[in-house]
Image (spheres, helix red, strand yellow):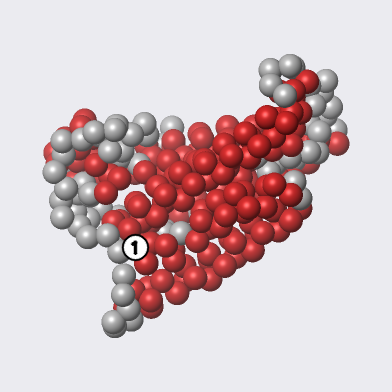
């Protein structure tokens, strides 16, 4: 069930490929259904139409509500990714191999064991609003399973490397559903916010795109903006180690 070392190394490429398939949804032309799940219309437009067609809520109320929900999910994704990376560091977050340093019990890691994976899942869910309904369903099923396999692999690795301290942490902190309160004392790591923001530009971009451009219902524009955001994030992420080592740069 847990992911292999090759899957972990290629995790970003695998997730990008799955998301691309969700946007493309090549099965739409070959498979039609009466519920409209395979129409080439974005979920952010399809969902309000279906809610109004079923007389559950008026289209005038459903349309802005869906946009707000999508933007809120994206905001949660950005917050979790930035908060987690501020403590763990982009070097560990983006490494091709699993690393086990000191036990991390600071920031979001006091409330949930995998805040970064949870943030990624929320980002995928937010992006799914811009996909055809069947593409969104495909992406969320495949990436939910994939993220769970990555989590199981990391947990097994950390248990083997850190031993009893991690087992105690494992029992005290939930895997994916954060607890609201915690009695765990922080371990003292200091957050580095600027470095974190620079390395998490993609979830920030997804949030801004959904919060600002969704109201235009120009899906092509939003997809292009997400591609640009992803490209910029890759360039800036490559520069993060140098930025971190620049003397006198305030964080």
Q: What is the x, y in percent for residue 231?
A: 60, 65
Residue at 37% from the left image edge and 73% from the top image edge: 241
Quarter occupied by the C terminus: bottom left
Which of the pair 145/87 is nearer the observer?
A: 87
Which of the pair 135/210 is nearer the observer?
A: 210
**Vertical placement of residue 147 versus 233, above or below:** above
Quarter occupied by the N terminus: top left
Which of the pair 227/197 is nearer the observer?
A: 197
**Vertical placement of residue 214 versus 202, above or below:** above
Q: What is the x, y in percent for residue 176?
A: 37, 34
Give SS at disc 1: helix
Residue at 23% from the left image edge and 49% from the top image edge: 106
Which of the pair 237/126 is nearer the observer?
A: 126
Q: Is residue 114 left or right of residue 77?
A: left
Q: What is the x, y in percent for residue 194?
A: 37, 67
Q: Is residue 43 left or right of residue 205?
A: right
**Vertical placement of residue 244 versus 50, above or below:** below
Tell how many labels. Answer: 1
Residue at 70% from the left image edge and 41% from the top image edge: 131
Residue pointed to by mark 1? 193
**Vertical placement of residue 228 versus 159, above or below:** below
- Tell me where residue 94 sits by quadrant: bottom left
Q: Is residue 57 visible?
A: yes
- Tell me where residue 38 sits by quadrant: top right
Disc 1: CA contacts within 10 A as few (<14), some (14-19) or many (>=20): some
Q: What is the x, y in percent for residue 18?
A: 62, 45
Q: Is residue 115 left or right of residue 216?
A: left
Most extreme residue toward the front is 60
Q: Is residue 11 left or right of residue 82?
A: right
Residue at 49% from the left image edge and 70% from the top image edge: 236
Most extreme residue toward the top is 55
């Amino acid at each position: 069930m847990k992911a292999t070392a090759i899957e972990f190394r290629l995790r970003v490429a695998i997730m990008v490929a799955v998301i691309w398939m969700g946007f493309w949804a090549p099965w739409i032309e070959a498979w039609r259904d009466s519920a409209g799940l395979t129409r080439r219309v974005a979920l952010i437009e399809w969902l309000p139409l279906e809610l109004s067609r079923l007389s559950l809520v008026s289209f005038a109320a459903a349309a802005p509500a869906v946009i707000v929900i999508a933007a809120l999910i994206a905001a949660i994704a950005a917050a979790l990714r930035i908060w987690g990376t501020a403590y763990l560091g982009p070097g560990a977050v983006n490494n091709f191999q699993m690393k086990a340093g000191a036990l991390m019990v600071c920031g979001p890691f006091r409330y949930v064991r995998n805040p970064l994976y949870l943030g990624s899942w929320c980002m995928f869910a937010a992006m799914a609003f811009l996909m055809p309904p069947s593409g969104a369903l495909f992406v969320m099923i495949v990436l939910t399973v994939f993220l769970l396999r990555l989590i199981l692999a990391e947990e097994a690795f950390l248990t083997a490397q850190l031993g009893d301290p991690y087992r105690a942490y494992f029992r005290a902190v939930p895997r994916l559903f954060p607890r609201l309160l915690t009695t765990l004392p922080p371990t003292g790591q200091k957050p580095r916010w600027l470095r974190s923001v620079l390395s998490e530009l993609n979830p920030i971009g997804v949030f801004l795109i959904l919060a600002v451009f969704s109201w235009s219902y120009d899906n092509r524009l939003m997809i292009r903006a997400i591609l640009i955001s992803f490209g910029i994030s890759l360039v800036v992420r490559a520069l993060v180690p140098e930025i971190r080592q620049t003397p006198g740069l305030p964080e």
